[in-house]
Image: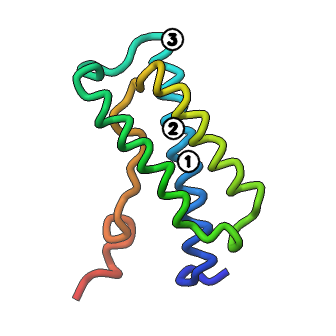
């Protein structure tokens, strides 16, 4: 699969959605067992809005270009994550960080 293709971008988006969804689900499960992150009650609405935006972004992925099982898993993870986070909050404000390519392969960006 070409990296710079619609199918490559759809696969990358779906895998990233799944990874981020699992990370936030874990964060919500931890919040249910322990407590939400410090200051969560003050920012709960904003935090939940960001999580909803992640879930809504799944609608921009052309699901015909990726494995139905993978897409379904990512969608279900986000639905489950939102259900838990609505009642328990989250333990982490940020769950993933993808390094820019220039940090991984700086020689590609030198003049």
Residue 10: percent from left, percent from top: 59, 70
Q: CA distance from mark 1 to mark 3?
A: 21 Å
The answer to which quarter of the image holds residue 25 is top right
Instruction: Give the left or right position of residue 39, taking residue 50 as reference.
Output: left
Residue 99: percent from left, percent from top: 37, 58
Of the 4 image quadrants, the one containing the C terminus is bottom left
Scheme by which the image is coloured: rainbow
- Give the answer, above or below, for where 16 lies relative to 25: below
Please tell me the numbered disc located at residue 23: 2
Q: Are marks 3 and 2 in contact (CB under 8 Å)?
A: no
Bin the neighbour count of mark 2 within 10 Å (Cα to Cα): few under 14, some 14-19, many 20 and up: some
Q: CA distance from mark 1 to mark 2?
A: 6 Å
Please tell me the numbered disc located at residue 32: none
Please tell me the numbered disc located at residue 33: 3
Bin the neighbour count of mark 1 within 10 Å (Cα to Cα): few under 14, some 14-19, many 20 and up: some
Bin the neighbour count of mark 3 within 10 Å (Cα to Cα): few under 14, some 14-19, many 20 and up: few
The residue carrying mark 1 is 19
Residue drawn at x 59%, y 59% is 14
Instruction: Give the left or right position of residue 105, taking residue 87 as reference.
Output: left
Q: Are marks 1 and 2 in contact (CB under 8 Å)?
A: yes
Residue drawn at x 33%, y 34% is 93
- Give the answer, above or below, for where 77 lies relative to 3: above
Q: Circle 1 — which element?
A: helix
Residue drawn at x 25%, y 83% is 110
- Give the answer, above or below, for where 14 lies relative to 111: above
């Amino acid at each position: 699969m070409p990296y710079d293709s619609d199918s490559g971008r759809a696969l990358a988006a779906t895998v990233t959605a799944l990874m981020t969804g699992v990370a936030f689900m874990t964060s919500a499960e931890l919040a249910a067992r322990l407590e939400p992150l410090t200051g969560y009650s003050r920012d709960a609405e904003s935090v939940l809005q960001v999580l909803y935006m992640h879930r809504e972004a799944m609608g921009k992925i052309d699901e015909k270009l990726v494995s139905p099982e993978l897409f379904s898993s990512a969608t279900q993870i986000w639905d489950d994550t939102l259900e838990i986070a609505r009642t328990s909050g989250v333990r982490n404000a940020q769950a993933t960080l993808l390094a820019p390519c220039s940090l991984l392969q700086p020689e590609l960006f030198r003049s």
